[in-house]
Structure formats: C-alpha cells, structure tokens
Amino acid sequence: MASMSVACRTLLALSAVVGLSSHSVDGWRHHPPPPSSVFSSSHHHRTRLLPRNVPSTARDRPYCYMARKSTSSQSRRLLVSIRGGENDLDDSRTEGGVITPSSSSSSSSSSSLALEGEQRSDHPSEGRGCPSSSSGAPLLSSFDIPPKIPRLVFPTGQTPPYHGDDRPHDQKLRILLLMDSFCEVHGQYLAERARDAYGVATLSLYSDYMRGYFLHLGPDDRPDDIMESLSMCMPSSFEEVDEWRNRLEYDVASTTMGGGGWRGYEMTALVCDSDSGLAHAERLAEWLNVTTRNPGGVREERRDKHLMIEAIRSSGLPALRQRLCSSREDAIEYASALLSLDRDGDGGGEYDRRVVVKPVRGCGSYNVCLCDDLDSVTRAYDIIHGSGVFGSPGQRHDAVLIQEFANGQEYAIDTVSRDGELKIVAIWKYDKRPANGAPFVYYATRLYDDDDGVMEPICPAMHAYLNGCLKALDIRWGITHSEVIVTPDGPRLVEVNCRQHNMDFLLLTMGGIGYNIYDVLLAAYFGRDGDDSAAPDGMPFNADGNRLEWDLIPDIPTTRMNACMVHLVNSEYGTLKRVNDAALYEIEAMASVHNMEVYSNFLEVGTQIYPTVDIKTDAGWIQLAHPDPKIFETDFQRIIELMPTLFEVEEATTPGSEQ
C-alpha cells in the first residue's frame, strides 16, 4: 500500500492486529489481548497519532489525533472529493447556496426549510470539488501522461509459504484488486491480510474518476508523484485492457521463473473504496472477467436512489412512496398529495406529514431536506435541480426525488455476500438529531443487537428484508452498507451502497463483536468450506488462525461490548477564539474513550469555523467502547453535554447575520 500514500498519507491506526481463530469467530489466537485490554482506559493502550499539519499551539494537545481530515491539504481535498464531495471536476462554480431545513417546528404553517447565505462559497460544505485552472481545462497535456501499469504486490516473500511441495504445480495466482483505497487503516489491513493469510496477490489502482481528478490538478496542487498516480489508474478501453493484461502476465511469469511456481493468474475479486468509483469498478470487473463480480455489468439502480427503490418495489418488497420530479410543478403536486394523506395513510400505519426532498446521488445527508410545507419543497427543489451529480463530472440533476418521510428508527447494516448468501457483520443504530437548522445531523453511530432490552427483536426481519433487497439489485458478492428505517409497518430501505461504511469502524467491531467486515469479506472471496488444514488450494499453512471459516460466521452478529462512534457537532459560527481544553481532556480521560480526533481546522485559533449541518462538516469524532453499559452510557451522555462548550468564537453569530 505504500504506492497509495499519495491519496491518503495517514498512519496505520491499528498498531497491532489480533489474530482471529478459524474455529470460533468469537475467539482470539496468536495475539489474544482480551477486550478489557484492547479498550483499556489507560493511555498506554491508546493509539495516539498526532497530525503533522496542525499549528504549534495544538501540538501539545493529546486529544488531537491523526485521521483523514488532519492530513495535508492535498490529501484532504482528495478525500473530500472522492468520499464526501459532490461538485464537478470540470466546474469550479459554487453550487446554488447553502440550504438547510430550519430547526423551528413550532408551527406547521412556517417553512421548515431556510436558505442561508446566497453563493456562500466559503462554507466548508460548498465548493468541495476538485481544484481547477482558471480556464477549467485539464492542466496536464496528453503527452505528459504515462502508460498505465499494474502494480502487483505478491504474497509475503513472493514465494508462497507452503510446506514442501504440497501445493499443486498448476496453482493460479489469485489477485485482489483494490480500487481507490484511500484509507490506509482499512486498505492496508485488507491488503496485508489477503497476502499473509490467504496467499493472495493485491493490485492497487485508481478509478477513472480519480484520473479526471489528477488531470485537473493545478501545478500548485499536484503531489510530487503525480505521474506515478496516473500510471496506477485503471485501463479505460479494451485496447488499454489488453496492454495492461500483457504487462500483468509478464510480471506473473517473471515471478514464476524466480521460484514462485505460479501457473497463470485469476482476477478473483475487486473492492472499491470510493462511492464515486463504483460504476468504474463494475465496468472494469466486466472487462477483466473478475470471478466474483456481480451480474449485469454496470447497473445504475445500485447507485441511483430512485431506480433502487423502484427495483425493490418491483420485486414485491415494501418500499417508500416516491416520485422523480422533473419540474417544480410536478414536485409541488406530488408533495401536496403526500402531505395531505391522513395520519393513517393508505398503508395502515402512522404517517408523518412531512416529505423528504433529495438528489438521486449523494452521501452523508448532503442536500437531503425534510419539508413540512410546499414552500420548503419549492426551495429544496430549486437548490437540487441543476446542481452537480455526485461522482459524475459534467452531469447535472435534471430531476429531483420526492419521497415520503419514513417515521421510525434508522439503522446502518454492514453486510457481506458470498454467491448470494448474506451475512450481517454489524448493525449500527443512528443517532441523528435536528441541529443548526439541519434535520439529520449525526451525533452518534452505535453498535446494536437485539439484546439491548429496549425494542422488540428486529434483526431476523432486517436480515430477511435486506436479503430480498440485495437479490432485487442482483448483488451476490461483496460488501454492502445499507440504511434501513424500521417503521410501524416494518422495514423500509433508504439506500444500499456497494462499499464499506465510510468511517473507521474496524477497531470498534473487533472489540464489540470479535471480528470485522474485512476478515468476513476475505473469507467470502478466498476461503473454503470446512476444514482447511491440508490447504490444497494454496492457502498458507502458518496463517490458519488469521482466517475465518465462512460457515462458522453467524448470519446475525451478537455484541460482546458496547461501542459507538460519536460525531462532534459544532454549533458556533465565526472566528475561533478558544478551544475548551478542559472539556477535551475530560473526554479523553473517560473510561469508555478509546480513540478520538478533533479536526485541525477546529484547533487553530483565528480560523473561521462553521456549524455542523452534515457528516462532512462535523468537528471530529470519538470512539467509545466499554463492557459495562452504565459506564458507557454515562460517558456518552457527558460527551453530548460537553459538545456545545468545545469551541468559542470571537463574536457569537449565526450564518448570514453579517449581511
């Protein structure tokens, strides 16, 4: 993964990875620290990674940790563009304005949507696309672009660590392709685990979306190794695929002559880490004939939220009412029909007289508006219509999605599929609240199972419903991260994402459940059924404790520890005057707090800070885990209580008050 460092120069947050027993998914082997030591409150057990680019005044703050948003400005722009951005690569103009639903709900006659600051390009949720030249044209000549070269990393030592000559001589080299793996916490773990535990080669590459990003960088924004990055981009045509394959075959053959003993190769799996690269990943999987690709090639219903819900409805599963509206009049007509429904609706359950207005592509609740009257629907429609389509440079929304508001608890479900067999790896309970004029601000993402004693068991119904949704979308292999709302009438799908959860939940699931989604994914792609002690398929003998057996992984997990990710919500707007060090030190000392980060722009006195309105504008994060639910809950509630006190600005203002 060293060659990927141009995209995200973070340090590996998991300083030591525990070995998992292949005989018990809840067991530890080789390096077996119990959960109490993994999540010890002692500072000696915590991963402390200090940002490199923070002001000197912040360097002595232990609560300032390294993560994606504390990397260099180049890396940060890159990550925002790919993992949370939505503006075009070829358009540097600001999109519309900042539109967020107001927090006032005292009167149903007042609009629940407020337009704040026309053309406010300095807001952190705006203008987050890729840098461009003044002309908007790519800044690298086609003559400067190097050929695309597959960067294959062979299993440990290049020669498989087998006993004697037990492995068949006709064994093919299995390859795992890693597209847009920007987070080294996840990407490095997955790559090293594949090579060391399964004897699999890994190949890192960038999507065509990333290629457009690299070509669009100005001279001052380019990393030093821009040419290396361009050479790692995926082949973009059949001709390039043939040339790329020839280079790969030469590399494999050269290793064979060096004693590796490989007889050809197999493109076994492709994992894409970025939302913007998913369509490119599907296309490349078809071109390369990847063994575990999902059927149908490039399927827009796996990303387009309108097409997705319609596919679910067509399969016979319950789905949200919705309409894709190409005119303001159409939006008003359909929203009026939804808003006028009786409280019981026509489905027999309680119906909330609000509607959701959102784009068909996006993430992190960006431009998702909750409206309770037609004026707010109109303003939401106007801000979305004509805006850039997430992950699709040059395209603009010519229609806006209007959906019923599903009244219930929202969950995020992380799953892995193996040829149509579904395993839920983790269920997360969203804690979203109205804040700073926005309706869906993330406060926490909490690990959940049916033993919480609060609700009736929902996990079996969730598994059955989600299994049906994935079948409707023809998703038979790989990771999915889905969001489902459990209403009085049952579960309703919000969306399915064919990628991992976009926060670093690896360590929380290791402690809270006992395994993680990447070990389950590798078991799905490369593992075998039953006892693999003879390892005739070429898996290393000396790493059996680091492999999971697919058949032993439960369909629904159970938790052994309370765990959650807290998102730091900032409510201040203005020039940062003071950081509440005492509160942050108090949080750091809590028994449940394992890891945390305050983003560097919220630590530098004199910088402009903005209220949190979505997950991309939060002020940092805190990872909590503890086996005692009372201690865990006490710490969590205290953090929520301290959150409004963390930052003090020069002058208490609200966005737009300076105008």
Image (cartoon, rainbow, N blue to C red):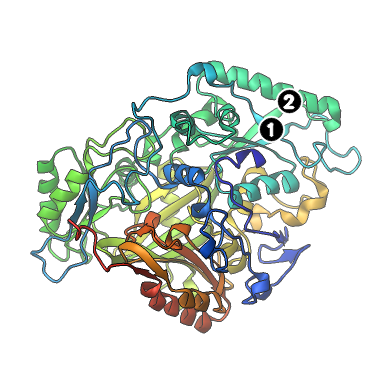
Q: Is residue 258 above or below residue 35?
A: above
Q: Is residue 259 visible?
A: yes
Mark 1, residue position:
152
The reply to whether the C-beta atoms of the residues labelled 1 and 2 are less than 8 Å apart is yes
164 displayed left or right of 416: right
Q: Quadrant of the N terminus?
A: top right
Front residue (pair 561, 113): 113
Give the percent coordinates (x, y) of residue 476. 51, 42
Viewer-nearest residue: 659 or 30? 659
Q: Is residue 571 left or right of residue 521?
A: left
Q: Which residue is mark 2?
A: 251
Residue 514, quarter of picture: bottom right
- Local packing at callout 2 (Cα closer than 10 Å; few below 14, some 14-19, many 20+) is some
Q: Tell me the quarter of the image containing the C terminus.
A: bottom left
Q: Is residue 552 above or below residue 590?
A: above
Label 2: which secondary element? helix
Residue lying at 84% horizontally and 25% vertically, measured from the top left: 257
Q: Quadrant of residue 445?
A: bottom left
Where residue 57 appears, as percent x and y from the top left, is: 51, 64
Taking 622 as reference, is 390 left or right? left
Which element carries disc 1, helix, strand or loop?
strand
Distance CA(mark 1)–CA(mark 2): 8 Å
State the residue in front, 42 or 299.
42
Residue ID at (81%, 40%):
157
Residue 6 place in picture, x, y as percent:
58, 40
Q: Look at the image and tell me whether residue 528 can be seen.
A: no
Q: Nearer the viewer, residue 246 or 469?
A: 246
Q: Which residue occupies 54% across, 21% down?
A: 145
Tell me which amino acid carries mark 2. Answer: Asp
